[in-house]
Amino acid sequence: MPCAEALLAGTLALMTGWAQACCDGHREPMARKIVANLQNLAQLEALTPHFRTMLWSLQTRWVQQCTNVRSDEALVAAEARRALWHSAPEALQ
């Protein structure tokens, strides 16, 4: 396992990349990796208990972020399918 500093630096870089991602398709894999890194950091005995608690809290928020990204992608896909529908006429003949 990499040292805590390297893992923390990589996680912060991923968070920056997630915030600046040009494609939504890249966000979910980055968020999953962020969650995994935060989990690994929270399990390191070298870190203080308070810092590890903060890491677990961050991990929980990023898990929710992953869920939100999936929900947003499903909503966008549904809107794209609906855009192909024809609108109903105002009156029938």
Image: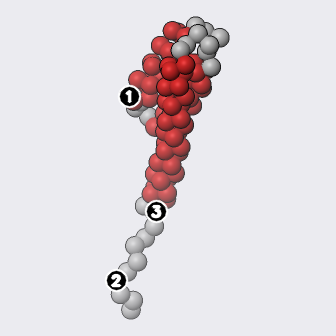
Q: Nearest to the eye among marks 3 and 1: give it.
A: 1
Examine the rendered structure and indicate whether residue 11 appears above or below residue 67: above
Foreground residue among 86 and 17: 17
Residue, disc 3: 82
The residue tagged with tag 1: helix, strand or loop? loop
Residue, disc 1: 20
Q: Where is residue 91 in the image (x, y as percent from the top left)?
A: 35, 87
Residue, disc 2: 90
Examine the rendered structure and indicate whether residue 68 appears above or below residue 17: below
Residue at image location 40% in from the left, 73% down from the top: 87
Q: Alpha-carbon distance for marks 2 and 3?
A: 19 Å
Amino acid marked by disc 2: Glu
Which mark is first along the chain, 3 or 2?
3
The residue tagged with tag 2: helix, strand or loop? loop
Confirm whether residue 75 shows in the render. Answer: yes
Q: Where is residue 58 in the image (x, y as percent from the top left)?
A: 49, 30
